[in-house]
Image (tube, helix red, strand yellow):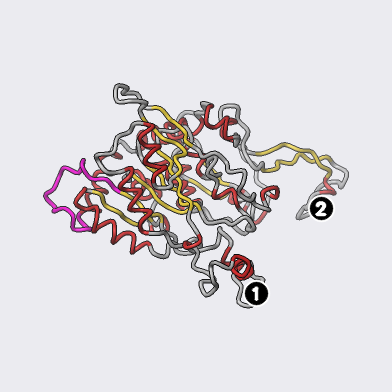
Amino acid sequence: LRSNDDVQMYVHHVDRRKQRLFEGHRLFLGGLPNNNKFENFLSLMPNDSCRCYTKLVFCGYDVENATASSLPTPNSTIVDPDDNITVLKPRALINNPKTACSMNTDPHSLKHGNCAAYRKLRRDLFNTYSEKDPMLVQKIHQYRRQILIQKGFISNNTSNLDEWKFVGLAHRKYRRKWLNIQEVTSMCDQKFERYKIVCITIDVEEADSPEEQLLMHRSLHAFIGVHGAQLTQGVLLPKHGYILELLPWVPFYLWGGWVASTHRPTPLGIIFHNTDLNHVGYPLGRESVPLCLHVDASDEKLERACLMNETKGGALKKFRWADRDFNVPVKVIEDFIVSFLLKENNSICDDMHKRAEQKNFVLYNAFCQRNMNQTRYIAEKYFRVQDKEQPSNIHDNER
């Protein structure tokens, strides 16, 4: 290839019901060497018709053989039913020796291993973003400045923003809505403006372009949201940034217990493992679920019956963690800011761990110093020990 302009990227959505290419897809594809043009894979075959191309490179597929008769074909007269056909089958994941360690889920290996896959991902993304836009640093500074002006925290003449810290609250319009997000934002403005900390809502659906999404997240010092895909953009935070992953309340009888794991990172949280970011978790409780509030919470049997749709007016469909809206105790966000973002907090590993434990936070990945005499930062892990006495989730083996 003579240059990146010769590369055209295509995204293959295996599920034909979900063919839309979102701005978030374009954002991360923009971190790869390419010509900044992204299309759906099906555009190569308009109206399901065949086309010839000089060169196609397939990533994430298995090559298999099959007889023509075993495959759905638009026009079976084109080939003999007994002909052998080469089939490209999408994989669930891309196997690469350099990133294989990222699939490790064993707590001991995660805690003591040195998998650098996601650290390298961050480095490569930002090298590409910076190469494509030499003005990126200045745009981030201007983006932060506009936030403070809109909040009324600074005047148009203010130029020094270095003392300010920006906290993003992930907001969604549909599933997993943060119901009391405005209450949390108001608390933050009232209590922490004096410490030069500002809280803003981050809604990627309102971004007009991939660049705006990049500025949204690269401008943050901390990013807070419930477990889910919206936290993926947390990998875009600057070095030393914080991600607070709010873990859904998943009782032992509800499918999906792994999204609330505290003895190892969640399937989403693993992307912050061994990076130069601080990944914190907080287990939400029953009070975060705005369902079956008419039921006496002390009656666990009756509450379960209501939540699991076993009684009239039950709520199972809305109770599933992936579909459920949620409330967050305001005190949790206040404790997080006080424990980790105020100036008086140091970055000593053990001190960060103690502050986390005092307020019931899980410190999955701490980018910290071993002591005051050491200037080098390391990635330390403080997963909790799995409580064997707690009832295991009855659906754990179904995943």
* x then y, percent, for residue 182: 34, 63
Compared across the picture, whether 347 is left or right of 106 comes to left
Compared across the picture, whether 138 is left or right of 173 comes to left
Residue at left 65%, top 43%? 92
Residue at left 24%, top 43%? 141
Element assignment for label 1: loop
Q: Main secondary structure of the magenta part?
A: loop
* x then y, percent, for residue 287: 47, 63
Asked if the stretch drawn in magenta spans residue 197, the answer is no
* Image: 152 above or below 131: below
Q: Report the span colored magenta.
A: 149-166
C-alpha separation, residue under disc 1 versus residue under disc 2 = 52 Å
The residue pinned by badge 1 equals 311
Q: Nearer the viewer, residue 70 or 364?
A: 364
Asked if the stretch drawn in magenta spans residue 155, the answer is yes
- Judged by depth in the image, the label closer to the viewer, 1 or 2, is 1
The residue pinned by badge 2 equals 76
Neighbour class for label 2 at 10 Å: few (<14), some, many (≥20)?
Answer: few
